[in-house]
Amino acid sequence: MARDPTTGHEFISHPADIQVAVWAPTLEALFRETALVLARLMVPGPEIALDREIEVVTEAEDVKSALFDWLTEVLFYSDSELFVLGDVDVRSVESLPGGRYRVTSTFKGEAFKKGHHVSGTEVKAITYSYMTLEREGEGGYRLEIIFDI
């Protein structure tokens, strides 16, 4: 899938963990880019086959909590099933009554294979503190997030 030139990320210096800024024109693109950054930190390569799909739907009290819970699912499948995320289809980040949000997505990837995949940085948790998620006018969204290593 071709990347949107208005979507990207950059790493920010942090004394102990990994901090990253992510930007995208939509919440769906922002969630996807953030998940792919997280996945490449944990398994930087080589190319990952997309031969397994996992449907993931999460719901939370606000958009930041929805992102936090959804990224925690990336870690859960990586740790519990040795799933290597190669791509993700974020079909919707939907605003629900009462300010709640639902994320509907499909994780695409394969099982970790020793001798093929390279282990990268062990990410222990997504950090909710210091997370900022802001709308940038009509230009999209910007996120700053810290991954606990």
Image (cartoon, grey):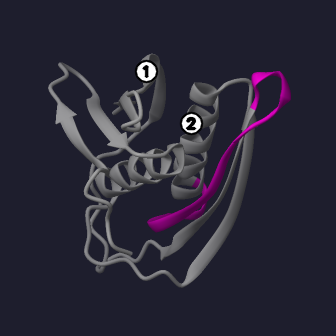
Q: Which mark is residue 67?
A: 2
Q: Quadrant of the N terminus?
A: bottom left
Q: Position of residue 73 (x, y in %)?
A: 61, 47
Q: Which secondary structure, mark 1?
A: strand
Q: Is residue 127 magenta?
A: no
Q: Nearer the viewer, residue 57 or 52?
A: 57
The three-letter code of the residue at mark 1 reads Met
Q: Is residue 146 above or below residue 55?
A: above
Q: Residue furthest right?
A: 97
Residue for point 40% across, 77% down: 113
* Image label count: 2
Image quadrant where residue 36 sits: bottom left
Instruction: Return the residue at label 1.
Output: 131
- Density class for disc 2 (Cα within 10 Å; few <14, some 14-19, many ≥20) is many
Mark 2 belongs to which amino acid?
A: Leu
State which region is magenta: 80-100
Q: Is residue 16 above or below residue 45?
A: above
Q: Specify which label sits upstream in the sequence, 1 or 2.
A: 2
Residue at the image point whose x is 61% and y is 43% from the top: 70
| Residue depicted at x 27% and y 27% | 17
* Magenta: main secondary structure: strand
Which x, y percent locates residue 99?
75, 23
Q: Quadrant of residue 3?
A: bottom left
Q: Nearer the viewer, residue 107 or 110?
A: 107
Give the left or right position of residue 15, taking residue 134 as reference: left
Crowdedness near tag 1: few (<14), some (14–19) or many (≥20) residues, C-alpha within 10 Å: some
Q: Alpha-carbon distance for marks 1 and 2? A: 10 Å
Quadrant showing the C terminus = top left
Query: In percent of the image, x 74 and y 24: which residue is there?
Result: 61
Q: Position of residue 33 (x, y in %)?
A: 39, 51
Does 92 sit left or right of 134 as displayed?
right
